[in-house]
Structure formats: C-alpha cells, structure tokens
Amino acid sequence: MANEFSLINKYFKPLGEAIASPNVVMGIGDDCALLANKPGYQLAVSTDTMVAGVHFFADAHPIDVGYKALAVNLSDLAAMGAEPAWFTLCLTLPGRDENWIKGFVQGIEILAQQFAIPLVGGDTTKGPLSLSIQVAGWVPEDKGLTRSGAKVGDHLYVSGEIGWPYLGYQVSTSSLQLNDADQREGLERFLRPLPKLALGANLIDVASAALDISDGLTADLNHMLTASGIGAELDINALPLAAPLGAMSDDIQRQAINFGDEYQLLFAVPSDKQTQLTALQEQLSIKLYPIGTLVDGPGIVDSQGNPIAPSGYEHF
Ligand code: ADP
Ligand code: MG
C-alpha cells in the first residue's frame, strides 16, 4: 500500500502511545517491539482472525468491527485468568478508506483504553478486508486457568445470560422483531460483548477449569469435558436464558443456546471453593449462574441422564 507509513503513524502509533505500560520498552516504529518480562508471571498469548463476509458483514460499521476484534481476543485472556499486557494488529485493507480506518481504530480504542492494553506492532497490507489481532496477557506462574483441570463433583457456572447475541444477530438481519428495550439489549450484546477480565483474573484461585463461550454453550462445554477427561450433567432448566427466548419455541431456544458469540465465561468450581465464589460475586457485584455438575464421562447428559449432543459453530 502506497501510504502505509502515514496510515501507521496517523492511526496506529497513537493507539500504542496513548496507553503507558512499564513492560513496553519500545512500541510501534522499529523492526520489532521490545517488551519486558514480568517476573513471577507467564505470558498467555492468543490470536483471532476476522474475515469480512465470514465473521462480520462486509458493510458492518467500522467501530463495531474494531470493537469486536479486540473484544473476542480479550475474552480469551479473560478465560485464562490473564491480565492484559499488549496486542498486535495485522490488517488487510482493500483500499485507503480513511473513514473506515478511523472508525475501526475508534472501536479498538474503546476497549484498549478501558483495559489499558497498548498496541505494540502489526502489519498493514492491501487485499480483501480481514484482520488478525494477537493479544498477550500475564498470568501468575503456573496458575493460568486451563480447560483441563475440571474434576468429577465440581460445579459448572456461566457468567451471564445466554442467547442475547443470537437475538441481536436475528434483529440485525431483520429476521426478528422484539420490543425496543430487548432489541437494544440484543444488539448491544451481539455487537459490543464485554470481555470478563476482572472475573477471569479473580477465578484463578477459585475455578478448576474455564473457557469463554465463543462456539456455543454445548460445543464449548464439550471442549472442557474432552480436555478434562470427564462428563457433565447439565441442568437445562437452570440455564439463564435471555428473557425474550422464554416465549419462543424449543427449537429456537436450542439454536440460541448453541449460537455462540457469547463471550461469557463457562467454568468449574470445586465444592470446597463455593464460599470463595459467593464472596467473589459480592466483591464484583455480579451474578453467576450454576448450570450443572461434572460427572464421570464422557459427554453431556440432562438431569434425566439423556445425552445432549454438542453443537455449535465450526468452520470446516
Ligand atoms: P517491516 O517492514 O520492518 O515489517 P512495517 O513497515 O511492516 O515494518 O511496519 C513498520 C512499523 O509499524 C512496525 O513497528 C510495525 O510493527 C508497525 N505496524 C505496521 N502495521 C501496523 C498495524 N496495523 N498496527 C500496528 N502497528 C503496525
Ligand atoms: Mg511488516
């Protein structure tokens, strides 16, 4: 791209300089960024790619695209219990549409500021619109929240209501009409998910396993079960479904539960950590929802012992 350097200096460099970090020795502008280690911690690193027409509508508002690109990556840090450290951004643009870039950077900046995470580098190329963000975060040594630590007898929780992103998606494609308040709530949860970083970091000494719900509740639960080598009994009636779904068919409820794009945390807590979990809810002023128990596996069953087949989003 002819003017890639002016784009970098005008739009991306400020996203690094706006957020001070003791670990960023040198950010955007050289061949590499220079980043300092944090003693006693390990780096949790994750990357997610978003392709126009696959992960977002090609005509989506650039602020929404930027916001969500960083949100889904921060959600992976949250699921690991990590504290944000820095991120990089690889951007492929079809042309120099400065209005689009400006909006996109604005969307990223909302979360970069909120969670004090600086942009330290990236790449800018020309081609079909797509973007990759790589995030890094700090976890106390050997304490990262993995998917594999859940044990039989642990209790399963989700961090919030399930199904709002499905409703928001249906509203945004004009396939569904809800009352104004529900419509707003659905769109907000679909377009502006808030990564659960404070919860994740505080679950480090409480949860035995955790992940974020991106593919769909049963698909992601199945990831935890496979990694932990156990099964789960899911209490379907205890699932905190988005209120408007209550009046909809079983089939639509199932679709909503398995839609994904939630970015709520799904985690397991041993019985002897329940008191700590209760205290945590008060400390963070949040409501956590118990949705089942971990049992001998494999797979997911309902309260009557009937198998529930995992289903969710898959690319291939
Ligand atoms: P090089 O040719 O050495 O790879 P580039 O010209 O690709 O360098 O990038 C110059 C500087 O700008 C580097 O520090 C790089 O990390 C940064 N950079 C390029 N594109 C982006 C972007 N989209 N976001 C953040 N930093 C970027
Ligand atoms: Mg480069």
Image (cartoon, rainbow, N blue to C red):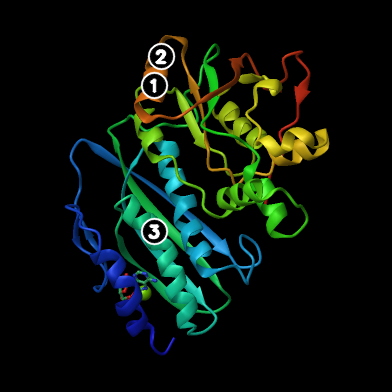
Measured as percent of width and height from the top left, residue 221 is found at: 61, 31
Measured as percent of width and height from the top left, residue 136 is found at: 35, 50
Q: Earlier in the sequence, mark 2 or mark 3?
A: 3
Q: Residues within 10 Å of mark 3 (few under 14, many from 20)?
A: some
Ligand 2 rendered quadrant: bottom left
Determine which of the numbered discs, if any, sits on residue 31 in the image.
Answer: none
| 53 displayed left or right of 277 | right
Give the total of numbered labels: 3
How far apart marks 2 and 1 lie (CA) works out to: 6 Å
Please give the residue where the numbered disc 2 appears in the rendered image: 273
| Amino acid found under the numbered disc labelled 2 | Lys
How far apart marks 2 and 3 lie (CA) works out to: 34 Å
Relative depth, front residue between 198 and 30? 198
Please give the residue where the numbered disc 1 appears in the rendered image: 206
The residue at 23%/66% (across/down) is 17
In the rendered image, the vertical position of residue 109 relative to residue 298, given as above or below: below
In the rendered image, which quarter is residue 122 located in?
bottom left
In the rendered image, which quarter is residue 124 located in?
bottom left
**Which mark is in front, 3 or 1?**
3
Measured as percent of width and height from the top left, residue 260 is found at: 63, 44
| Amino acid found under the numbered disc labelled 1 | Val
Furthest residue in direction bottom, as rendered: 2
Please give the residue where the numbered disc 3 appears in the rendered image: 110
Q: Are marks 2 and 1 in contact (CB under 8 Å)?
A: yes
How far apart marks 3 and 1 lie (CA) works out to: 30 Å
Q: Is residue 251 visible?
A: yes
In the rendered image, which quarter is residue 1 located in?
bottom left
| 81 displayed left or right of 183 | left
| 283 displayed left or right of 53 | left
Q: Is residue 316 visible?
A: no
Measured as percent of width and height from the top left, residue 119 is found at: 32, 62
Kindly state the secondary structure of the residue where label 3 is placed. helix
